Image (cartoon, helix red, strand yellow):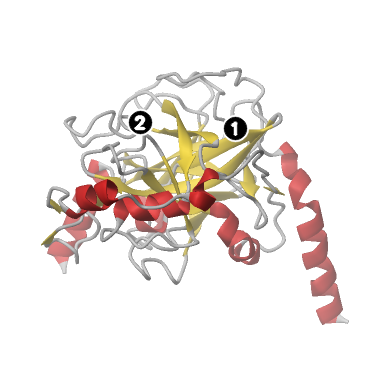
Amino acid sequence: MAALAVWILFMCTVFTESEAQDCGVAPLNTRIVGGVNASAGSWPWQVSIHYNGAHICGGTLISDQWVLTAAHCIITSTLDLWTLYFGIVTQSGPNPNQVTRTVSQTIVNSNYNNPKFNNDIALMKLSSSITINNYIRPICLAGNSSQFYSSTPCWATGWGRLRSDQPLVAYNILQEVQIPVVGPKECSCDYTQDVNITDQMICAGQPNKGTCQGDSGGPLQCKQGSVWVQAGISSFGPQPCALAGYPSGFARVSAFQSWITNQVFGTNVGFVTFNSSGINQDDSYVCSSTTANQNQTSTTTQKQTSASETTTTSSATVPELSFTLISAICALFTQN
């Protein structure tokens, strides 16, 4: 009987998820084309994750108790060093709709970085549930049957750098940029030797438009009807940012529906099947010799992934880390 009760509870959770707390609805978001500065309430699920007093990564509210972010953002298991900010637009304030929470639990996908950058997903549980309003709302997550065709228009948001030549500090005002999905075949051709693009990844971007250091953990979100659906979690990208031929890389949310559901068992999380229309151009994409040659001669850069990976490589990719995160990793390394 106990096993049956658990199974019934699980099935009830699954079948009610798509309506959880009216996920993906942003009453104050009316934009149609690209912008720069976001306005209050435009992205009510956007979270600023602070480590030791400073912005380190982005995240998304997926229920009144849980935040979704990138695995590489969780650099410590010491819970009292984390503070989560909801309902904010600027890092400096004032933010009249601001609410903060501490963290009671962090969960990192056990298969993160196997292979490199793969399974870059983590969860943070709030110390207490948060009240949902027009400025603080959960986003819907892409369900495991979702399809994001090449060129599907989506949005990336975060407090990361606007350009690679800017200081490695969080940008004050929440930024938004509209970018198209880049199919896995094309993305694999773009990165060639740098990253193995897996089924757990999704790419998006175009020259001079994409994510940058400090955007880690933030969402790639696409609109279906009146509902916003999170397709990806900001994970890695080229250096310099938004480099032609190198789209931004995200963890593919739809690949982790079972994992997320298992971790937040008993919590209503909204999963929605996103369906692209038309023909998927990536199905017939073929790598060109120009693309391959370009990517084999990418400028050598120093990866900024973790303290254990500080050697120079031929990869032009780095995770979308903030200066705070890089500094924290270095501090942890020097203590050991």
Q: Position of residue 183 (x, y in %)?
A: 48, 48
Q: Is residue 173 shown left or right of residue 95?
A: left
Q: Residue at x 24, y 34 (%)?
A: 169
* Circle 1 crowding by C-alpha within 10 Å: few under 14, some 14–19, many from 20: many
Residue 260 in the image: above or below residue 92: below
Q: Position of residue 229 (x, y in %)?
A: 62, 40
Quadrant for the C terminus, please.
Answer: bottom left
Q: Position of residue 208 (x, y in %)?
A: 30, 29
Q: Residue at x 54, y 24 (%)?
A: 97
Give the residue at mark 2: 209
Tell me which amino acid carries mark 2: Lys
Residue 207 in the image: above or below residue 203: above
Res 26 → quadrant: top right
Q: CA distance from mark 1 to mark 2?
A: 27 Å
* Circle 2 crowding by C-alpha within 10 Å: few under 14, some 14–19, many from 20: many
Quadrant for the N terminus, please.
Answer: bottom right
Give the residue at mark 1: 136
Residue 216 showing in the rendered view: no
